[in-house]
Every structure is written in structure tokens, then in C-alpha cells.
């Protein structure tokens, strides 16, 4: 540098060392981190493709679950009818028992 320059030579040396350190240290570190990120993303993508078939099977197996609500409603009606039948059978049994005592 000349005597008339605005910055002393030390500033340019520090600038050169800083840029060289950045190129030597940070660029390879960034490449390594991006490579690691890419490997992880590919691994996630691979496992996501593997999970599709089991997920579809689970969805198919659980598709009938909403139908259980209608089954419960029908079962409630059947239970009420069965209780009515049980009461009538009890009444018939009582009547038949009374007739068998008379005879």
C-alpha cells in the first residue's frame, strides 16, 4: 500500500485473513450441514413412502367404526323389544304355573 491510502496495510491483511478463514472454515461446514440435511430429508421421504400401505390398511380396517353408532341404536331397540318379550314370557309362565296347580 502507498502512504496516501486511506487504510493501513494491516486492515487489508486482516481482511484477507478473515475472508480466507471464512472460505476454509465456513464453506466446508455449510456443505457438510447441507449434506446432512439432505440425507435426513431423503430418509424421511423413504420412510414416508413405506408407511403409505400400512396407513391405508388401517384406514380400511377402521372405516366401519362409524357404522357402530347405527349398530348401537339398533341394539338398543332390540334390547327394549327383548325385555318386552321377557315380560310376556314371564306372564305366560305364571299363568301356566297357576293352571298346572289347579289341575
Image (tube, rainbow, N blue to C red):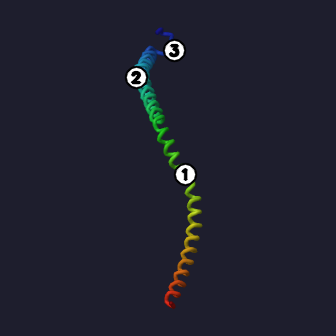
- Write the residue at 41% across / 25% down: 32
Q: Nearer the viewer, mark 2 or mark 1?
A: 1
The Cα atoms of the two marked residues, 2 and 1, are separated by 59 Å
Of the image marks 1 and 3, the number of the one nearer the N terminus: 3
The answer to which quarter of the image holds residue 76 is bottom right
Q: Who is closer to the viewer here, 72 or 89? A: 89
- Against 96, residue 62 (above or below) is above
- Write the residue at 48% across / 8% down: 2
Of the image marks 2 and 3, the number of the one nearer the N terminus: 3
Q: Would you name the residue on which mark 1 appears?
A: 64
Q: Which mark is residue 15?
A: none
Q: Would you name the residue on which mark 3 appears?
A: 6
- Label 3 sits on a secondary structure element that is loop
Q: Would you name the residue on which mark 2 appears?
A: 25
The Cα atoms of the two marked residues, 2 and 3, are separated by 30 Å
- Label 2 sits on a secondary structure element that is helix
Furthest toward the bottom, the residue is 102
Q: Who is closer to the viewer here, 85 or 45? A: 85
Amino acid at each position: 500500500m502507498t502512504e496516501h491510502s486511506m487504510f493501513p496495510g494491516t486492515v487489508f491483511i486482516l481482511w484477507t485473513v478473515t475472508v480466507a478463514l471464512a472460505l476454509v472454515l465456513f464453506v466446508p461446514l455449510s456443505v457438510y450441514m447441507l449434506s446432512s440435511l439432505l440425507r435426513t430429508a431423503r430418509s424421511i421421504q423413504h420412510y414416508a413412502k413405506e408407511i403409505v400401505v400400512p396407513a391405508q390398511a388401517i384406514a380400511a380396517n377402521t372405516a366401519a367404526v362409524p357404522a357402530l353408532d347405527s349398530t348401537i341404536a339398533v341394539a338398543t331397540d332390540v334390547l327394549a323389544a327383548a325385555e318386552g318379550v321377557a315380560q310376556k314370557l314371564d306372564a305366560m309362565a305364571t299363568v301356566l304355573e297357576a293352571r298346572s296347580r289347579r289341575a
